[in-house]
Image: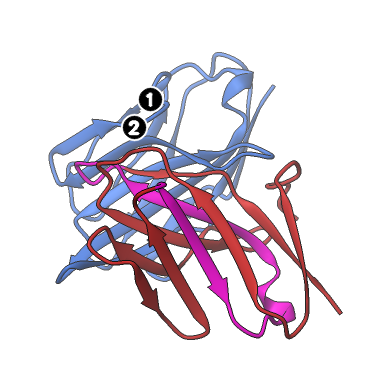
Chain colours: A blue, B red
Amino acid sequence: NAGVTQTPKFQVLKTGQSMTLQCAQDMNHEYMSWYRQDPGMGLRLIHYSVGAGITDQGEVPNGYNVSRSTTEDFPLRLLSAAPSQTSVYFCAISAARGEWYEQYFGPGTRLTVT
Amino acid sequence: GESVGLHLPTLSVQEGDNSIINCAYSNSASDYFIWYKQESGKGPQFIIDIRSNMDKRQGQRVTVLLNKTVKHLSLQIAATQPGDSAVYFCAENIGDDKIIFGKGTRLHILP
C-alpha cells in the first residue's frame, strides 16, 4: 500500500445519501483507478484515469462519478447510495517503467449501504 | 477479517511443494498480464507481470507462463510457504490501460 492512501477506512450510509471516497498518492504515478470487490468475486473496474484531466469508464461505472484535477488525487463520488453498492473499494496507481508497470493498491474502504 | 473469496475455487498444496494457479483470460488483444496476491483484509499486491510477446517470465520463487493460443495464464510458486496462503488473481490489460481482473483462486497451504 506504499504511497496510496484511502479515506475513510469504513463508512455506513443510508440509501439515497451521497459521499466521496478519497484516494491520494505521493508517487507521481500517472494512472489511477477505482475497483470494487464484493464477497466471492474478483475486483471490478469502476473508473480509471491515465492522467490529470482524463477519466474513463470501467466495467461497472453506473452510480459513480470521478474527476482528476490533480495527479495526486482521484476521488470517487457516490451520487445516491444504494444497497447494491455495499462493497470494499480499492484505489490503485500505476506508472510505466520502460516496457513494464509499477503498481500499488490502497488499503481499501469498506462501505455498507443500509 | 476480509470476507473476500468466500466462494472462490481453492487449491490446497503441501508446504514445500510447488503450486500452480491457472487463469483463462478473455481478450485475445490483451497485451499485458499481471498476477496479484491478496491477503485477508488487504488490497491486492503485485507479484509478477508478463507481456504478450513473451511465453515465460521468472521472478523470485514465482514463474508466469503465457499460452496465447488457448488464452491461458499460469502462476507457479516454488517451494510453497505458509506465507503464500492468500487469494491470487490474474488481470489483463484489455486496451487503453484498462486492467480487468479475472476470478481468483484461494491457495491453502497444508502443514
- For image coordinates 35% across by 56% down, the residue present is B33
Disc 1, SS: loop
Residue B93 is inside the magenta segment: yes
Contact, mark 1 vs mark 2 (Cβ under 8 Å): yes
Q: Nearer the viewer, residue A36 or B91?
A: B91
Read off the chain for label 1: A
- Residue B6 in the image, given as x and y percentages of width and height: 76, 44
Outermost front residue: B69
Q: Which residues are magenta?
A: B70-98
- For image coordinates 58% across by 17% down, the residue present is A82
Read off the chain for label 2: A
Indicate the amino acid at tag 2.
Gly
The residues tagged by marks 1 and 2 sit, at their Cα atoms, a distance apart of: 6 Å
Apparent side of residue B82 relative to residue A24 in the rendered image (left or right): right
Indicate the amino acid at tag 1.
Pro
Question: Residue beneath label 1, please?
Answer: A61
Q: Quadrant of residue A86?
A: top right
Disc 2, SS: loop
Q: Quadrant of the C terminus of chain A?
A: top right
Question: Residue beneath label 2, please?
Answer: A58
* Crowd around label 2: few <14 · some 14–19 · many ≥20 (10 Å): some
* Crowd around label 1: few <14 · some 14–19 · many ≥20 (10 Å): some
Residue A11 is inside the magenta segment: no
Q: Is residue B57 above or below residue B100?
A: below
Q: Nearer the viewer, residue B2 or B81?
A: B81
Q: Quadrant of residue A56?
A: top left
Q: Is residue A67 above or below residue A51?
A: above
- For image coordinates 28% across by 42% down, the residue present is B98
- Residue B8 in the image, given as x and y percentages of width and height: 70, 45
- For image coordinates 48% across by 22% down, the residue present is A18
- Residue B91 in the image, given as x and y percentages of width and height: 42, 51
Q: Nearer the viewer, residue B78 or B100?
A: B78
